[in-house]
Amino acid sequence: MSVELQERPESKAETEEQLTDGFHLLIDALKLNGLNTIYGVPGIPITDFGRLAQASGMRVLSFRHEQHAGNAAAIAGYLTKMPGLCLTVSAPGFLNGLTALANATTNCFPMILLSGSSEREIVDLQQGDYEEMDQLAIAKPLCKAAFRVLHAEDIGIAVARAIRAAVSGRPGGVYLDLPAKLFGQVMNADAGAKSLVKVIDPAPEQLPSQASVKRALDVIKSAKKPLIILGKGAAYAQADDVVKSFVEKSGIPFLPMSMAKGLLPDMHQQNAGAARSLVLKESDVVIMVGARLNWLLSHGKGKSWGEPGSKRFVQIDIEPREMDSNVEIAAPLVGDIGSCLGELLTAMGDQFPAAPDGWISAVNTKREANTAKMNQRLGSDTTPMDFHTALGALREIMQQRPDAMLVNEGANTLDFARSIINMSKPRKRLDVGTWGIMGIGMGAAVAAAVETGHPVLAVEGDSAFGFSGMEVETICRYNLPVCIVVFNNNGIYRGTDENNNGDGDVAPTVFVKNSRYDKMMEAFGGVGVYATTRDELTTAVNEAMDTGKPTLINAVIDENAGTESGRIGNLNPQSVVKK
Ligand code: ADP
Ligand code: TZD
Ligand code: MG
């Protein structure tokens, strides 16, 4: 009897105790840190997590394939400076998301891949659990940091660590491993709330040393033919005013890397993009601002850079190990773009010597000549359209709609669009980035629409589009203002390759001729347009951008128009042995 009496008040207390669990703690931890959007694909063990997150007011966007959800998360990170979230199921879903995580890390975009995983005890003994895989070990070499959470009370600290790892220093991808059992773990709600961490100042300013500022300024002042190269790190930094002040106060010509286009308007008179070969070859001091001297800049050496030893580099980067990665850096400036350029501006004072006249006029002359040549080609109105006809039309549209977001992938479709379509505002151009990866298109388009609310124009090679094409259903489902233009030239680079071996197969680069990608969009209730002329293309894009309706325009492009590998044919080994 006495035992019974003692037990009763205890069990009453138990029923009154407010509880929380792993599901809710994770949602609360993310929301506490302002992370309110999840891109993912549901399934065991995270289905209920997605439902509960949505019920809690988070935006949960389901994709058809994790890679595209991951690409969306990466672009969300690039646009917001806070990690984009990608949610995947264990093993196969995790692996599908991993390409995006690795790509984000390579591009210095902050994202967190949250993946459900199977039970540690079974995985570690390799006893064949449902979707068994040692995900943490596999993720580690492909991202900036990887953590596993085994206890509900650690969720708060794990999310905090993941956020800091993603956005501090050089941004990148972070993996958070969430075993199925974690979600159902129950704990006292008050203790749970106390276990959450709101990250204070996740990406603190990083000031350069005064000595490095002085050294950089001395090098810049000594230049006769200075050049500034702006990279996507500078766009990411959101220090737009400081970048503009530095460029304009110095009067130095600048060259924007692909995704840095629009950081200063492409029409800016110091933009040396149209005189690229000249400025790379002739410059004597090159100021790198958030751009790496990787393959995209021929590693800072070789023929395109002129005489060996003719250059000195100033490099501004948040990652100290980037310095001297390919060539000697005469003046490394380690810190965030805003702080470094701010310090340089202060040190420049009011009496900063203007960039030498002869250099500026040589650059201007070259730029004007090349621009005039290009403008002539852009007026072209061929049917079937070639790249200049179709992109001439899109260039005009983008000029009239400076707030629109541009997504771009393909080979010729990418290279021509990059040089033809001017950008007027920062972080509007999203493309294949450091790896030249195909398949970012629809994920980037979804994130661009969701994160900015502006209309999105996705300019896609027909091959490039195919990598993420099924996500047109996602775009229709969420009714996003995305207009996709598929540059349909019947294949990879061009549609004219032939197979002569007699087996009846087409060549490896050729697709079904005259495909109707527009019908894919119609299948999900979007608008499909088949465009063969410049006028038809212009009308259809304008209508899509005005109405905001999900639209796919199949733009018929002359199958002879492209070249192998677009502008990077030099990287493409070709056999000289004919058999
Ligand atoms: P691009 O492809 O446009 O040339 P990269 O991706 O090669 O640009 O280079 C971007 C660089 O910017 C990286 O080296 C990265 O460390 C750096 N970076 C990123 N964010 C910042 C920042 N806030 N401040 C300074 N450097 C940054
Ligand atoms: N797979 C992945 C993931 N990334 C890649 N970059 C490639 C394959 C190889 N590749 C390119 O580099 S461009 C490209 C492929 C398949 C497609 C080019 O064809 P397209 O563009 O139709 O998209 P154009 O306009 O016909 O040149
Ligand atoms: Mg093509």
Image: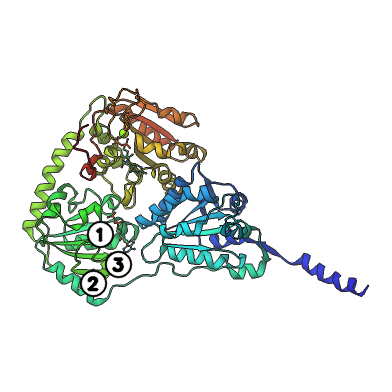
* Residue at (44% x, 67% y) in the render: 202
Residue bearing mark 3? 321
* Vertical relation: 453 (above or below) 563: below
Q: Is residue 169 above or below residue 68?
A: below
Front residue of 60/70: it is 70
Q: Which one is nearer the viewer's eye here, 451 or 113?
A: 113
Disc 3 beta carbon < 8 A from ligand 1? no
- Which residue is located at x 52 percent, y 64 percent? 159
> Residue 244 — which label?
1
Residue 279, position as x, y percentages in the image: 13, 53
Question: Tag 1: residue type?
Answer: Lys
Left or right side of 233 for 186: right
Q: Amino acid at mark 2?
A: Thr
Q: Earlier in the sequence, mark 1 or mark 3?
A: 1
Q: Is residue 191 visible?
A: yes
Please tell me whether mark 1 sits on a helix, a strand or a loop.
helix
Q: Nearer the viewer, residue 541 or 282?
A: 282
Q: Please state the quadrant of the image where ligand 2 appears.
A: top left
Q: Residue furthest left?
A: 358
Which amino acid type corresponds to the residue marked 3 in the rendered image? Answer: Arg
Q: Which residue is mark 2?
A: 346
